Image (spheres, rainbow, N blue to C red):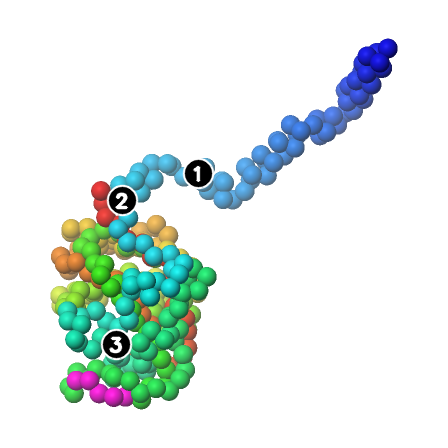
Amino acid sequence: SPYLHDYRLIFKKENEFWANKNRWQTTEEYETEQRYTTLANNPDIIFYESIDPVIFDEINNLKLTFEDNFDGNTILDGIWEYGFRYPSYKMMSNHSFVNEHQANNGGKNVNATNGCLMIHTKKETVKAAAWDTSKGFVEKEFNYTSDVLHSKDFKQKGGVFSAKIRCTGKLHHAFWLSGENKNNHINVFHFNGKHITMGNATVEGFFDQIELTGLSASAYYVYSLEWTEKELIWYVNNYEVYRTQNSVPQDELFLTLNSFIAESQKPSTGVFEIDWLKVFVRK
């Protein structure tokens, strides 16, 4: 009988299976178990499972108000403008300062590539406008160029301001908030060529800030500012690093990104990279 033949094959196969001391290793369940063990030992999964989900309640309390992932030419899309932000468009916004080594280059040193905004500081000689506190605007020859840009229309009072950032070169790179009257200035991120700092300008004219150690500016980190009615709190990768109640702004502020070479620095080239930038308000 063909059925008897089939039963004999099944019996033989089952008998071989149960006679095998390592039969568990031949099963699909064993492969599933091994895959589970591999995943369970993965550092990312260990970290994920160690996180208390309560911390995500904070995210649910935030509403996104501004986002740029720099996937396209966001400058041409009208999200950003070159130069500094001033109350009137008739004022010269694209300029440098006489005590700097670089000319701000009208956007020629800015590009968005592979989902990343980059401000390049280059060695090249140009003549450009520079602000002199005693003479006003003067024409100066610079041996380096860079750029500054600000959010065109977006401004906000309070909330959470975050950006994923890295940079190279022994010069200044900064993500900061400021108003049209320049009475307020908050550094969400500032690299001064040697150290990373975070802080804000006080009414007395000095910076209330922290200098971070142990971080490489050339590696990506997420730098954030939480701005409440009474307090400013800074974070790196969601870890609090500094807070102050000193000179908390009460006005809406614009976003600004720039690189520059201070007079006291030996000029060098570098790149300021922003992978993404987001702003939130509390619901």
Disc 1 crowd, CA 10 A, few/some/many (<14, 14-19, 20+)? few
Residue 235's x, y, as percent? 31, 53
Disc 3 marks a residue whose amino acid type is Asn
The reply to whether discs 3 and 2 touch (Cβ–Cβ < 8 Å) is no
Segment tinted magenta in the rendering? 136-140
Secondary structure under tag 1 reads: helix
Q: CA distance from mark 1 to mark 2?
A: 23 Å
Q: CA distance from mark 3 to mark 2?
A: 34 Å
| Front label number (1 vs 3) | 3
Residue 135 at least partly seen: yes
Residue 7's x, y, as percent? 81, 14
Magenta stretch encompasses residue 219: no
Residue 106's x, y, as percent? 31, 76
Residue indicated by mark 2: 62
Q: Which quadrant of the figure contains the N terminus? A: top right
Query: What kind of secondary structure does the magenta stretch mostly adopt?
Result: strand
Q: CA distance from mark 1 to mark 3?
A: 49 Å
Measuring 67% from the left and 29% from the top, which residue is drawn there?
28
Residue indicated by mark 1: 50
Query: Looking at the rendered structure, which numbered label has been put on residue 94?
Result: 3
